[in-house]
Image (cartoon, rainbow, N blue to C red):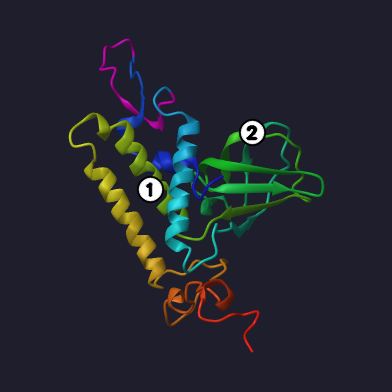
Amino acid sequence: MGYCTQAQVESVLAQALTSATNRVTNGDKVPLIGFGNSIDPNTISTAVVDQYIQWADEEIDGMLSEMYEVPLCEKSDLELALLFDIGEYNLEIELDKAKNLVPGDVLVFFDDVQEERHIVESVSNETVVELTEPLIGLYSMDDTRVVRVKFPTPISVISARFTAANIYDKYFASQVSPNTSEYGKRLRQLGLRDVNNILNGRTILHGQKRIGHRFFNPNLRDRYRLPGIPDGDGTRNIEGDN
């Protein structure tokens, strides 16, 4: 898993790449072109999205490697409790703090013998959470812990924007002239703005290991490797010099 999920990329991605739906109602004829809310798998597969997420994450790591130890690590920021026991292959669950969740959040369910990781599909009625895939195991409300894990803000947003911009330009804007879109440029501008806020110290990535120095560029502290006397100094005879 990268810094963002496919659900987050779909939320950011322009709807020009989402699948068409047939909105026929009561037998009336309507235009077939209608954009949905999910990526068309015939155009962009899950493997392609994962690859673009990986490239976006590498770009982020490269920009932040001077200040933070990369790759960045997830942290748990919210613990929730089950309101009812979970049966086998359950897709909908009830949690006490579900109103704090949004689609795309990652939840980890675990007890003494098992652990599962799932992505939130939707939240309704402040307690009901629908997952993208059903839970496989049986979980008791008394013995199960549920925590939300995420990368520090705004890393997931930056990764989703970079991923969506690159996908949009490759699969949509590349077929027109010019081959870059204003939408893709805007996403990159927003992503670079957030990265600059991190590099300038306005945004702190809590829970991450900081490296470097506070008051000067760490690249100025160490010199590049210079050849030693035995390697590069031909004016002295190391073995026979008295």
Front one among 143 and 40: 40
In the picture as drawn, the residue positioned furthest to the right comes out as: 113
**Where is residue 183, by image quadrant?**
top left
Circle 2 residues within 10 Å: few <14, some 14–19, many ≥20? some
**Kind of residue at badge 2:** Pro
Segment tinted magenta in the rendering: 26-41
Q: Main secondary structure of the magenta part?
A: loop
**Kind of residue at badge 1:** Phe
Q: Residue 88, percent across and down? A: 73, 32
Looking at the picture, does residue 102 appear above or below residue 15? below
In the picture, the disc for residue 183 is none
Q: Can residue 62 be seen in this snapshot? A: yes
Looking at the picture, does residue 14 appear above or below residue 70? above
At mark 1, the secondary structure is: helix
Q: Nearer the viewer, mark 1 or mark 2?
A: 1
Report which residue position mark 2 lands on.
134
Q: Residue 142, percent across and down? A: 78, 51
Front one among 236 and 142: 236
Q: Is residue 191 left or right of residue 87?
A: left
Asked if the magenta segment contains residue 27, the reply would be yes
Q: Residue at x 51, y 50 (%)?
A: 3
Looking at the picture, does residue 24 appear above or below residue 208? above
Q: Residue at x 35, y 41 (%)?
A: 166
Report which residue position mark 1 lands on.
162
Circle 1 residues within 10 Å: few <14, some 14–19, many ≥20? many
Tell me how many marks there are: 2
